Image (cartoon, helix red, strand yellow):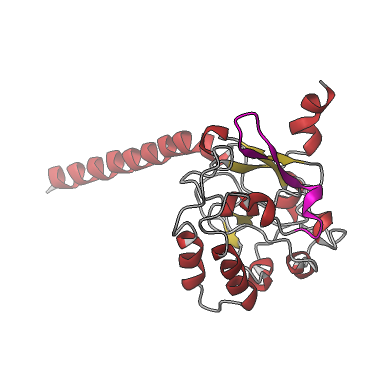
Amino acid sequence: MAKVKTDRREFVKYSTLGVLGAVMAGGVIASPYLNAEETRLRPPGSLGEKEFLGLCIKCGQCLQVCPFHSIELADFGKGHGVGTPYIDATKRACWACNAVPCVLACPTGALDHDCEKAEDIRMGIAVLEFPDTCIAMTNTPIPKGFSTKMHKFTDNVNNVTQVELDLVEKLDTFEGKQCTLCADMCPIPNPLSAIAMVPDKSGGKRPEIYDGCIGCGACEEVCPTQIPSIVVKTRVTYEEQYGKDKQS
C-alpha cells in the first residue's frame, strides 16, 4: 500500500510540473503575439494606441450605434486589446457617418469627442499597395458579381439598416463599367479632397491619394480585386506616407 501511495505522489508531482512547464512554454511562445505591434484599424476618433487601450472600457457602445455594422470587438488573436473595438475594412469599412455616432457613444474619451464630423476622422491613409492588380489601370471593366461579398455581409446582418441597403444598391450600378470605385464610393462630403482617378502611363487610370483621406477603408472594401489593390495603412498620416514623394 505504501508503494502505491508513493507512486501516486510522484505521479501528481511530475504531472503538475509538466502542466506548469507547458503553460510557461505557451507563455513564451504567445508573448511575441501579446506584445506585437497593434495594426488593427480603430474606430473614428481613437486616441494613440496606448492611450486608447488605457481608456477603453470595452463596453461595446460604439459597436451598438454604428449604422453600417462596421465595428467588431477583438478576440485573443493578437495584441493586448482583447474586447476592444476595431474595424476590418476587408469585410466592412467605416463609412464616415457625418455625426460620427460611435464617438458620441464613447463614455470615456477613448474615442476623442473633438472628432465631430467625417472630415475630422483620421484613422490612417489609403495606399495603392498592389498596382499590378488594379483593374482601373488596365481599363478592365468591373466584373459581374463583384459586389457579392458586400451583399452577403448585409444579408447576414440581423438588424440591417437602410443606409446599408442603399450602399449595396449604389455599388451594383457600377457593374460592367470602367473601374472608378475607390474614388466614386469615397464617403466623405468632398471626396476629391481625398482621392481621384488620374491618367496613368499604362493608358488606364489609377487612384491618387490626397491629404483629405481619412483612412476609413471604404476604398479597400469596394475594391473588386480578389485581394484589394488599395488598402489602408493604420495610424499613418498623409505626410508620413507621401511627404517625400511630394517633395521630390
The percent coordinates of residue 113 (x first, y second) are 84, 62
**Screen quadrant of the C terminus:** top right
> Which image quarter: residue 185?
bottom right
Q: Residue furthest right?
A: 114
The percent coordinates of residue 147 (x first, y second) are 50, 60
Foreground residue among 77 and 148: 148
- Residue 94 left/right relative to 92: right
Total label count? 0
Whether 169 is among the magenta residues is no
- Residue 112 left/right relative to 202: right
The percent coordinates of residue 209 (x first, y second) are 74, 41
Foreground residue among 227 and 234: 227
Query: Is 156 placed above or below 82 here?
Result: below
Whether 203 is among the magenta residues is yes
**x 44%, y 59%: residue:** 145
**x 62%, y 78%: residue:** 162
The reply to whether residue 174 is in sight is: yes
The range drawn in magenta is 188-206
The percent coordinates of residue 132 (x first, y second) are 53, 32
The reply to whether residue 88 is in sight is: no
Foreground residue among 185 and 62: 185
> Which image quarter: residue 97?
bottom right
**x 20%, y 46%: residue:** 8
Foreground residue among 4 and 182: 182
